[in-house]
Amino acid sequence: MLERLSVIELNRFQKFVDSPYFNADQRLSALSEFFIQKIKSETPEQLQREALFHLIWPQEPFAYARINQLLTELKRLLDRFLAIEYVQQKDFRLDFALLQTANERGWDKLYRQAFRQSEKHLISDFQRPEELAYFQYELARSADYFALSRKDREHTPSLEQALFHLQAFSLLASLKHVCELLNRQHILPSEPQNEKLENLIQQIEERSSRFLQDPYVLLYYELMCMLREEKHAHFEQLCTLLRQNKTAFSFIVRKELNQYARNFCIRKINQGETAYYAELLTLYEEALQDDLLWEESFISAGEFKNIVSLSLRLRRYSWAKSFMESYSDRIRPAQREAVLAYNEAHLMYAEGALQQAIRSLRSQHFEDVYYELGARTLLLKIYFELEEETGFWALVHAFGNFLRRHKQISAYQKEVHLNFIKLIKKLERLRQGQSRMRKAAFHTAYDKLAAELQEARVNHRDWLEGQLEKM
């Protein structure tokens, strides 16, 4: 576990172990310092317990139980350190612990100070609405306990508030979990339709009416309806809520909901509803504007490719070029050159600069398997369009072998790409034989291939159909 800590965390852990408040055993300090030095030297050794024992007790005979006990105690210290580090990063947890302590000790002045401090966190510290509702419940319950313990006989609304916030927490948590279950049913079609889930949805619908004035409840309720019914009206309402109440929703919620909305568009596109291409690009534009796509300040190679591909499909070539120029520094440095070469090649192809696209693709080796698939597919299209038969048939053979031998490619991706190769080969053979075929025979072969294109599970179907129509 120590190897997973950053250098800063390792230094803090050593100070933690060296502190007599947390640890009075100097042998644990020595053992921790030894492990940390090994980790920092980037030459960690898997030392046997006997070697560790003699590091601590050089003059004594090896005793397994003693070194094992010392290692166990060091692990307990690490566990406690991680827990304390987590709590210290959450100021509201520390303030609430102080609030509870002051309440139990009867220190009224400190309690009131801690209560005011805890209330400040309601505005600044919570990104997830269900966590906020639960903290509000805890505060209200604490206020009620404070009033009762001071023999305050006057009515206070704290208990009613506690119950309200507890119900809001339960509803929000239930809504979020139901939304994720519904989402997984779309991602994993084998997920069974759960009767208990339907019953839970009905209960949520009955409970939601009281809380629909809460923007978070309304937002997740619309998300649940969108995922359950797959209707455009719910998608539109969800997007409207996100856009009109942008400042009311936390960053994490906007990021999650934007992703849900994008997934909805992708499902609709896969079902043949091409109007959702524009909707999807709009959602990506909003995500870029609000910094919702970054992973440790970088954009993933996959998302970068998706955005460029989408803008090219919509023929927004200038936008695609501007996007690549504006966000190239957001690609991880190790991937940047290859990612830019790949996407620039697709832009060149879209604008008709086929030879430039070939040079751009050939200049790079793509370590990402899906970039490699995309690069080979684009090259195959270009060779077909340029009628470069030698390059075309060589790539057909190499691409097929690549797909059959590569173990990291999913079964679905293998199927759709192998089908693409099979169908583009048939297109090429039909084109080559067209001049030698009788008109009736050509039309028969044409219709047969057109029907096969309609039924096949294949990517780039529209391109294949477009090339067939040109014949």
Image (tube, grey):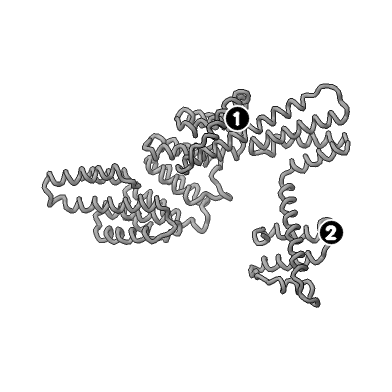
Residue lying farthest to the top in this orientation: 155
Q: CA distance from mark 2 to mark 1?
A: 48 Å
**Residue picked out by circle 2:** 20
Which residue is at a point 65% across and 33% down the rendered structure image?
A: 170
Q: Is residue 350 left or right of residue 80?
A: left
The residue closer to the viewer here, 156 or 468, is: 156
Q: Secondary structure at mark 2?
A: loop
Which residue is at a point 43% across and 46% down the rendered structure image?
A: 308
Which residue is at a point 82% across and 65% down the rendered structure image?
A: 26
The residue closer to the viewer here, 27 or 239, is: 27
Which residue is at a point 83% across and 33% down the rendered structure image?
A: 112
**Disc marking residue 217:** 1
The residue closer to the viewer here, 241 or 441, is: 441
The x, y position of residue 105, in whole percent, is 88, 39
Determine which quarter of the picture holds residue 275. Answer: top left
The x, y position of residue 167, in whole percent, is 67, 29
For the residue marked with disc 1, what is the amino acid?
Val
Determine which quarter of the picture holds residue 101. Answer: top right
- Mark 1 residue crowding within 10 angstroms, few (<14) / some (14–19) / many (20+): many
The x, y position of residue 151, in whole percent, is 88, 27
The x, y position of residue 253, in whole percent, is 59, 37
- Mark 2 residue crowding within 10 angstroms, few (<14) / some (14–19) / many (20+): few
The answer to whether residue 448 is above or below residue 77 is above
